Image: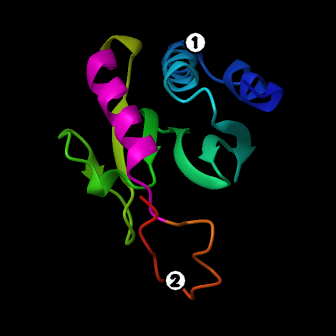
Amino acid sequence: MHPDTVQYHHALPAEERAVCEKLAAEIEAALPEAANKVWHAHPVWFLDDNPVVGYSHLKGGIRLLFWSGQSFATPGLAAEGKFKAAEARYASVDQVDVELLRRWLAEARDIQWDYRNLVRRKGRLERLR
């Protein structure tokens, strides 16, 4: 895990830190080839320079975001924004359903929209996988 992600965790209140540490451990285990960095002030994991999963601290908890999540077959994510992103929110670590999270992470590897070239394509997404 990138040191900036560890620093991000240390700046959080205890309950939110526990959620983020659990999410990060599962992401790292499921996507060991993914590059992690703090991007736009939040921890994000990238496959081939394309963002696939990340999380952020919001009022009332942690938002887990999958950039291509609206295309996942596994239910439980809510649509976010005007592209293909979808999210789950957690107020405490006991709300994290690890089996469901692992299914989403498997889909994150297999289902990807090309966010890396979004600007170059003038806001048009293309499916990579």
Q: Determine the residue positioned at 34% across, 26% down.
A: 101
Say which residue appears at 58% left-offset and 18% top-offset. 17
Magenta region, residue range: 95-113
The residue type indicated by label 2 comes to Gly
Quadrant in which the N terminus is drawn: top right
Image coords of residue 54 (percent x, y): 54, 41
Question: Helix, strand, or loop for circle 1?
Answer: helix
Disc 2 crowd, CA 10 A, few/some/many (<14, 14-19, 20+)? few
Q: Is residue 126 above or below residue 81?
A: below
Q: Quadrant of residue 74?
A: top left
Q: Which residue is mark 1?
A: 14
Q: Residue at x 63, y 37 (%)?
A: 34
Is 106 above or below relative to 65?
Answer: above
Report if residue 10 lies within the magenta region. no
* 119 left or right of 101 in image: right
Residue 45 position, x and y percent, is 61, 40
According to the image, label 2 marks what residue? 123
